[in-house]
């Protein structure tokens, strides 16, 4: 499978980018604190990323179905190259937030379009190859924090932003030379009204609507695990900066492992049971995590992350199968639109609840919502896939 140049190119490029992201994601909160003199605006680091990411998902998905995946992938890597330069030259937190807007725009095609491209290239093993790509994605994020610690011995923290910048540039070059775009077919020429009609029809269906609800909560969980939970660990569990680095690495490692486990198994046994099981694991782990201290809390949160990752891949494959080839880019763009809504609104809401009541209450409320969606999936979808997702109603 890795003899395929496109798969190899996508994997190499995303590992390079995400190693850089893993290095800088742990630096940004402290960078904002240093520039502002306080941490009141740290929560906007996630929201700034999610804002542009959210706005561009559907337009990028539709554009990819018209002009192909490769140009947009290259543009995404180049935008992230510029992001690293803005991080490096930033003299205020506003510049950091502007860079995060650029980063959200740049990563939008990297998250959504590469799996869509692979699903077209490997139609009989889409879960497996999408799992390989997502595992490589999160493997890079796992390695990044550790590599950042090593590089910190020879570089100052600001120079690490340049390492991220140029790793994205190399990724763009890899995409240019290795990735091939599938030949376009007649069915890919679709009017704009038909485009959104098909997506609207999908959202109206119970099967896909409940899936999108889960995806929104997944996005919220991803954002919470990047912001609210690290803040809780620092303030109430007395974690050190090194401990937080370990937390991030375990989070990314669990997501990566979940992609490897889920891909082939969901190809064989169906998507439904993995979506439901993933949500149940995440909900239980998050609701009980405040009861533990270091190091057990790291294990519990890692298991929760594993559950989110299982849901992520299974739901992505489920939706990918719900549309014809002409809408592969659009449906994954829509996937990350809902994901972005969760990531944009989830962390601020959870932070507000934690500040007004307690962290434990905020986590219990979030977990309860996940359980409701999981129960809804049991009722609407069942544990076993009875058939392919409903693409008959799409044009």
Image: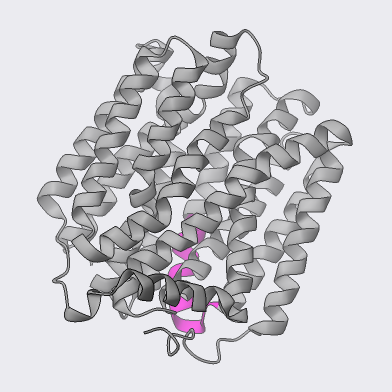
Rendering coords of residue 271 (x, y %): 53, 77
Answer left or right for 126 relative to 67: right
Q: Is residue 96 above or below residue 15?
A: above
The stretch in magenta equals 257-271
Q: Residue placed farthest to the front in the image?
A: 193
Residue depicted at x 51% and y 83%: 269
Rendering coords of residue 288 (x, y %): 81, 50
Q: Residue placed farthest to the left in the image?
A: 177
User: Looking at the figure, which quarter contains the N terminus?
Assistant: bottom left
Q: Is the magenta stretch mostly helix, strand or loop?
A: helix
Answer left or right for 97 relative to 242: left
Residue 264 visible within the image: no
Residue depicted at x 22% and y 33%: 169
Queried whether the magenta region covers residue 364, the answer comes back as no
**Total numbered circles:** 0
Residue 110 visible within the image: yes
Rendering coords of residue 380 (x, y %): 67, 83
Rendering coords of residue 353 (x, y %): 81, 39
Queried whether the magenta region covers residue 267, the answer comes back as yes
Q: Is residue 367 above or below residue 245?
A: below
36, 267: nearer the viewer: 36
Answer left or right for 250 relative to 68: right
Answer left or right for 122 relative to 352: left
Residue depicted at x 17% and y 77%: 185
Q: Is residue 41 above or below residue 263?
A: above
Residue depicted at x 73% and y 41%: 349
258, 334: nearer the viewer: 334
- For residue 179, which quarter of the picture? bottom left
- For residue 277, which quarter of the picture? bottom right
């Amino acid at each position: 499978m890795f003899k395929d140049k496109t798969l190899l190119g996508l994997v190499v490029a995303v590992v390079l980018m995400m190693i850089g992201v893993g290095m800088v994601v742990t630096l940004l909160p402290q960078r904002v604190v240093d520039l502002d003199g306080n941490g009141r605006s740290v929560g906007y680091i996630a929201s700034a990323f999610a804002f542009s990411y959210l706005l561009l998902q559907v337009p990028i998905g539709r554009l990819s179905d018209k002009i192909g995946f490769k140009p947009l992938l290259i543009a995404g890597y180049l935008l992230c190259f510029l992001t690293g330069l803005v991080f490096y030259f930033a003299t205020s937190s506003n510049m950091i937030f502007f860079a995060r807007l650029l980063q959200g725009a740049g990563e939008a095609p990297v998250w959504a379009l590469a799996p869509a491209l692979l699903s077209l290239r490997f139609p009989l093993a889409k879960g497996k190859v999408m799992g390989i790509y997502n595992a490589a994605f999160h493997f890079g994020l796992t390695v990044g924090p550790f590599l950042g610690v090593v590089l910190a011995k020879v570089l100052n923290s600001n120079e690490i932003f340049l390492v991220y910048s140029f790793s994205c540039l190399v990724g763009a070059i890899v995409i240019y030379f290795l990735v091939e775009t599938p030949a376009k077919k007649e069915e890919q020429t679709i009017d704009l009204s038909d485009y959104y009609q098909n997506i609207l029809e999908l959202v109206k269906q119970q099967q896909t609507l409940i899936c999108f609800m889960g995806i929104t909560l997944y996005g919220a969980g991803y954002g919470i695990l990047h912001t609210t939970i690290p803040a809780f660990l620092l303030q109430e569990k007395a974690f050190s900066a090194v401990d937080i680095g370990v937390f991030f690495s375990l989070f990314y490692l669990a997501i990566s492992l979940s992609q490897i486990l889920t891909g082939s198994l969901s190809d064989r046994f169906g998507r439904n049971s993995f979506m439901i099981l993933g949500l149940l694991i995440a909900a239980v782990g998050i609701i009980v995590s405040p009861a533990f201290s270091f190091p057990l809390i790291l294990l519990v949160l890692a298991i929760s992350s594993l559950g989110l990752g299982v849901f992520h891949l299974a739901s992505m494959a489920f939706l990918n199968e719900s549309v014809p080839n002409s809408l592969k880019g659009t449906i994954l763009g829509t996937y990350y639109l809902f994901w972005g809504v969760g990531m944009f609104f989830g962390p601020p809401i959870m932070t507000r609840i934690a500040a007004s009541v307690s962290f434990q209450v905020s986590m219990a409320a979030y977990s309860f919502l996940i359980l409701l969606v999981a129960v809804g999936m049991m009722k609407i979808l069942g544990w076993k896939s009875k058939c392919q997702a409903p693409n008959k109603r799409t044009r």
